[in-house]
Amino acid sequence: MTHIPGLPSYIDWHWLWLTIAAFLAGILNAVAGGGSFLLFPAMLGMKILPVQANATNTVALWPGQLTSIAAYKDDIGKNRRLVLPMSLAGLLGGAAGALVLLNTPQTTFMHLVPWLLLVAASIFALTGPVTRWLERRKGAVVGATHPPRRLPVFLCTMAVCFYIGYFGAGAGFLLITLLSLFGYQDLNEVNALKVVSTSMANGIAFLIFVIGDQVVWRYCLVAMLTCAIGGYTSARFARRVPQPVLRGLVIVIGLSMAAWFFWKNRG
């Protein structure tokens, strides 16, 4: 085992960091998103292969997402005509992304990791200005009541869900932006539809990774438990820390992790 000064000799700091990262990931996912920025590198730190680290990260985080469906039950009911297409898009896109991941060579995926983290962190960085632009657009389109066409929404959602199945960090905001651009103005309804598609995408990826024997369960179960605890205790934390501060923290973590992996992959 590897140790750091100040820790008892029987404590492996990799396990300690995995537990802390999972706890913090649960908090971030509950109040701002971006928990994968911490948990995925922590999984890699356990010396498992990159594809298995990503699969284990997805499986560990997914159960916590299911509770969101119950929370948005009423809002989901308001858009029943889109629930089935969004669910199907999540299943098809997530399955395709997960299968492509499992057929990606380990070294290739490892070289993609810093770029994926950089893209995801950039998505988070755009949340502020894009959200403000969407708010202005919302005021400009008041009175436009025609429902968005389902086929374009379905195809675009499936593309985002492909990314979810393959990697996924930052995809929630992509779906929120997508649905807003298609004319959905109620944030609760937008979040509800986002939860439906992301839960389906991550759920089918969960099954594919488990069936494909890509999950390292001893790490997954620890992360799953501590992530759930972090999510449960996040309510008080969320009330105390302003959202811009939380989002800024996620961006800094994401860019830092991207820089670390760019440095690690050099040469």
Image (cartoon, rainbow, N blue to C red):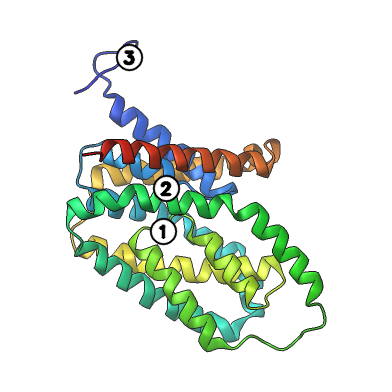
Q: Are marks 3 and 2 in contact (CB under 8 Å)?
A: no
Question: How far across and down, in percent of the image, does residue 105 sit?
Answer: 17, 57
* Amino acid tagged 1: Gly
Give the foreground label among 3 and 2. Answer: 2
Taking 226 as reference, is 187 left or right?
right
Q: Is residue 102 visible?
A: yes
Q: Choose top left, top right, bottom left or bottom right for residue 243.
A: top right
Q: Say which quadrant the C terminus sits in.
A: top left
Q: Are marks 3 and 1 in contact (CB under 8 Å)?
A: no
Q: Which mark is residue 7?
A: 3
Which residue lies under the disc numbered 2? 36
* Amino acid tagged 2: Ser
Report how far apart the C-alphas of labels 3 and 2 lie in the structure.
26 Å
Taking 257 as reference, is 111 left or right?
left
Which residue lies under the disc numbered 1? 168
* Amino acid tagged 3: Leu
Taking 254 as reference, is 125 left or right?
right
Q: Is residue 60 visible?
A: no
Tag 2 secondary structure: helix
Question: How far across and down, in percent of the image, does residue 37 sit?
Answer: 43, 44
Query: Is residue 244 or residue 263 the one in the foreground?
Result: 263
Report how far apart the C-alphas of labels 2 and 1 lie in the structure.
8 Å
Q: Are marks 2 and 1 in contact (CB under 8 Å)?
A: yes
Tag 1 secondary structure: loop
Tag 3 secondary structure: loop
Give the foreground label among 3 and 1. Answer: 1
Q: Which mark is residue 202?
A: none
At label 1, counting other C-alpha atoms closer than 10 Å, the crowd grade (few under 14, some 14-19, many 20 or more) is many
Comes first in the chain, label 2 or label 1: 2
Report how far apart the C-alphas of labels 3 and 1 lie in the structure.
34 Å
Query: Is residue 102 or residue 223 the one in the foreground?
Result: 102
